[in-house]
Amino acid sequence: MIHDFGIVWTERALLLSGLANTTILSVLAAIASLLLGFALTPALMSKHLAVSGTARVFVDGMRCVPFLLFAYIVYYGLPSLGLRWDNWTSGLFALIVYNTAYMAETLRGAWVAQPREPIEAGVAFGFSDLKLFRRIILPPLLLSAGPVIGNQTIQIIKDSAFLTIIALPELTHAASSIQSRHYVPFAAFITAVFLYWGLCLVVEAGVNSVGRLAEARR
Amino acid sequence: MSGGDIASIFQGAAVTITLSLIGILIGLPIGLGLALLRWANVPVIARIVAVYVSMLRATPLVTLLLLLFFALPNIGIPINPISAAITALVMNTSAFNCEVWRAALMNFPKDQYEAAQSVGMRASLRFRRIVLPQILRVSLPGLVNEMSLLIKVTPVLAVVGVVDITRAAVRIGAETYDPLPPFLVAIALYAPIVFALVALQRWIERRQSAAEAAA
Amino acid sequence: MAALNKVLDVAGVSKRFGANEVLSDVSLQVDKGETVCVLGPSGSGKSTLLRCINWLERPDAGQIYLNGQRVGVSGAGIAMSDRDLSKIRTRVGMVFQHFALWPHLTVLQNLMEAPVQVQRRPKAEVRDEALALLEKVGLVEKRDAFPSRLSGGQKQRVGIARALAMRPDLLLFDEPTSALDPELVGEVLVVMRELAHEGMTMVIVTHEMGFAREAATRVLFLDRGRNVESGPPEQFFAKPETERARQFLQRYAGDTANGKH
């Protein structure tokens, strides 16, 4: 068994590049889907039924489709429609679009739960438009949505593992390669599990520190 | 895509649903058991459960599945795709269920427990008659949410060769060189199942908050 | 042109929400240095009147002038731009029932936020003034605390200081003590009384009859959206002209007797 971990150690460069790719994918997808989610949230709450209805169908639709199937469709299905992307583009696109729906719904929930009076005070004190959003609405919104955004980021890290099926060289793919090359399945995959765990603990530590900030600023 | 192809996707759907149900039914009580071990603060074991749950919640189902499928035979435990799939689903979902149950247990009003003690109920009776019905009510939306998440990760089982909806669709796509139609059929099967659970969760939440408002 | 010392002129304002007429043809003039208390049963439109003054609600009819300038409508009956509206709003301070402090900012930051960000005044100057205001409401030692750490009375005193930091021409109070525990009402009224003595121009929606009786220069009594009665407090409290006002005062007589220390 120790010998098996020795083999994994000799392949550490491969494993670390897998970890790096998983991290890059997850960070890019988390940031992009958060920003797009922010853009979509007002549409979800729009008074125009056509706008809110369309946004709602997209969000609920994504929430009802398994991510793996969605990734399959983007990678294998879209070429039928003339869209042919490499596995990185497809994988990142799938992660971003899919999680945008979750982020938008999360932000909508946090937005609706915000007390109205401080925002109204912002209007009464002369804030308007972008400045009202940026200085009065956004900071408490981010603080209160912090934990859920963190959870969604962990979900993105785990979703990114599915992209191994379209041969994207992320962490699980790296572990698979090591296992098929040397036949050390336990050592290879358990190492990957620990690396995922570490990644999620980092996110959780971040969430906790945001939580501490939010605690004082409730 | 022929009628036979569609039939084979439906056969896959039966496999998906069966495996999901087995995962849910076994995962629920195990999750509760884990939560109780943590709640009761059993020395050492509570710590182990905490680490186990934290780790499993961070582990992608694909990675867990590959670990079980390839590593168990390696240490002398033969395992077929179906048992690997069920084991992975149960481990995954029980870790999440544990957190839902635990949150309900931690918020359980202490005075009720003491009231049950004061009328002479014994521990097992207290738990069955007083604690369980109430934490079940509180946990229900979270548990239903977890069920819909579980169904959404089942396509991964195809990776080790389980012929579920996704694997059937992939195979037809490969045979007909037109993967889009079978994938759309697959979506048409998944979406209503997941949507039904999402709707169920919203309905329960609405009914509970209406009941609270009336009280 | 309005008289130079007339700060606020509300002329025949009406507002309805659906079928419900909340304000009907209400007029009110406030001179510089006046303290006008708006009284009336719940749902009589008091808060709506206040919210129309700084255009948080758009009245359906009537005009509002602040220092002679029309609020909410510019030139030829066109709705005012956000920019102009914002300029007017910075001249009207508002104190909210539930304080409405910005939870993510410290006490001092709450005071400085709008003067620096909206009025674009120099930070150092705003800071000195904000500290002086905190001194005045007795909370200078709480300047770095977040609102969640304050008691209700302290929150409302910060709310008043925040409104004053804008150097407003007019201060609006929307039931400033209604959300407070009875023992915390006093500390807020002390601050408001001091402002009245200093000659701050204020319109105050309140249920504190004792405060209205001694601090108001004038009382406005609203009932079902109508201005039923108005006049100096001595006259209103001793000899109300209308039956509605008499009934109202009877209901609140107990409160006035018990509520004061």
Image (spheres, coloured by chain):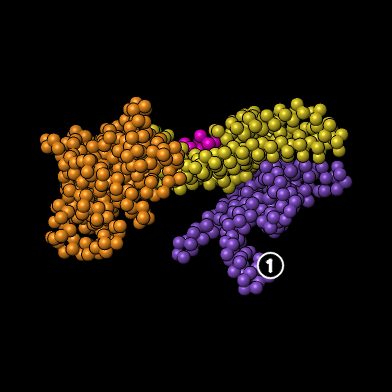
**Residue A128 seen anywhere in this rendered image of the structure:** no
Q: Which residues are magenta?
A: A33-42
Give left or right: position of C206 versus B71.
Answer: left
The relative height of residue A94 versus residue B146 in the rendered view (above or below) is above
Q: Which residue is mark 1?
A: B123
Residue at the spot x=65%, y=39% of the render? A200
Most foreground residue, C55 or A202 = A202
Residue type at tag 1: Ala
Numbered disc 1: what chain? B
Q: In the image, C179: left or right of B198? A: left
Image coords of residue A141 (percent x, y) = 47, 41
**Mark 1 neighbour density, 10 Å: few (under 14) some (14–19) many (20 or more):** few
Reply above or below: C127 against A210: above
Residue A50 within the magenta-colored segment of the rendering = no
Q: Colour of chain C?
A: orange
Image coordinates for residue C18, horizontal then vertical, percent? 28, 54
Q: Which chain is purple?
A: B
- Of residues A16 and C91, which is closer to you in this image? C91
